[in-house]
Image (cartoon, grey):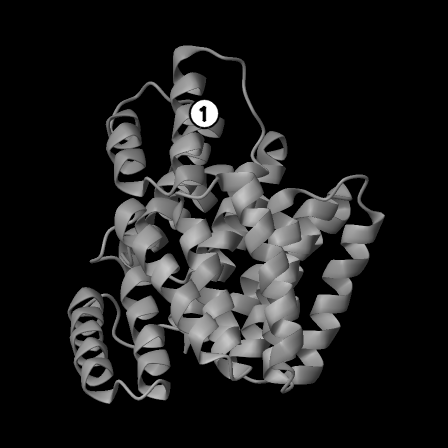
Amino acid sequence: MTRRCLLACVLALLCLNLCAQNPIAKTIDNARILAKQGRYRQLIDMLTPLLNSSALDTADRGKALILVAAGYQASGNFSEAHRALDQALSLLHDNPQCASDYADTLTNLSVLYRDMGDADAMKQAAEKALQLYKKANDQEGLIGVYVVLAQDSVNWRQSANAERYLAQAEQESRQSDKPGDVNRIAIADLQASVALLEGHPTLAVEDYRQSLDLRIRLNGTQNPETGWGYMLLGKADLKAGDINAALINMRQGLAILALTDGSGRVAYLYSEVAYSEALAADGQRFQAKHIKADATQALAKLYRDECARCQINVAALR
């Protein structure tokens, strides 16, 4: 899954309502912490026994399924992520007390469909989420959906649509009393993506520096999100013609991702593909060729049989 994509998932997770701190609620709360830290394998291992038991009520089971789905999606296991989200939707549908969680599930589902390349299903899920967030006057939720729609437009190189959705996200952010840090990062990333799409790499560098600073402030230096932020900045540096800065930032990003997320994970492998482009630009074509070939082969193996018609998009590093 894309780290952008991972960013949109964490946004939805942070919007979930906290319960009283009974043992089950405490476990779910600890799972949220693991999600923020990018420790998705531990998250899945923690929540699976609960999901296999009869101890969860409808609301808690829905929350746990959303978290588990995010863990599977971050691992590139789209089929299990989709199954968990389907279960959450079935549980939360038509339950007024779970309307917020139901909207968050739809947002996560729209991110999953976006990364699978299914534009029609993505828009359908996003539109349903928008209706619920508007009804609840949930500005944070609205920002999240507009970011998903805008990034999908960037992926398809639809500049006008990307700008329109970005403007809507920015408007909701201005109206919010205090926009969440995750949303602020998402908007900064999106501004950079649109700048790159429209041929303004220097502006993209500034936006990605801002989002990297926000990532470090929110997550610290040793976090997969921070590693991803360095990779995004490195790509913008490369587009702006600063090869040395691109190599420095990408190496930093790869080191953090390897340490915190693992070198066999989706984000790291796509980052290696991006790094190979910087190496080639620096004249290190032999090394670049081998790094790209190995990463591409590993990605193909990772996604094999995941779905028959997926187009795995990591547009920010494509």
Reply above or below: 11 against 171: above
Q: Tell me residue 246's x, y (percent).
A: 44, 72
Task: State the residue in front, 273 or 63.
Answer: 273
Q: Tell me residue 260's x, y (percent).
A: 31, 45
Q: Amino acid at mark 1?
A: Asp
Task: State the residue in front, 272 or 27.
Answer: 272
Q: Which residue is mark 1?
A: 29
Q: Tell me residue 39's x, y (percent).
A: 32, 39
**Taking 95 as reference, is 41 left or right?**
left
Reply above or below: 299 against 185: below
Q: Secondary structure at mark 1?
A: helix
Q: Is residue 119 visible?
A: no
Q: Quadrant of the C terminus?
A: bottom left
Residue 307 placement: quadrant: bottom left
Classed neighbour count for the residue bearing mark 1: other residues with Cα under 10 Å, few (<14), some (14–19), many (≥20): some
Residue at x 26%, y 85% (from the top left corner): 284
Residue 212 placement: quadrant: bottom right
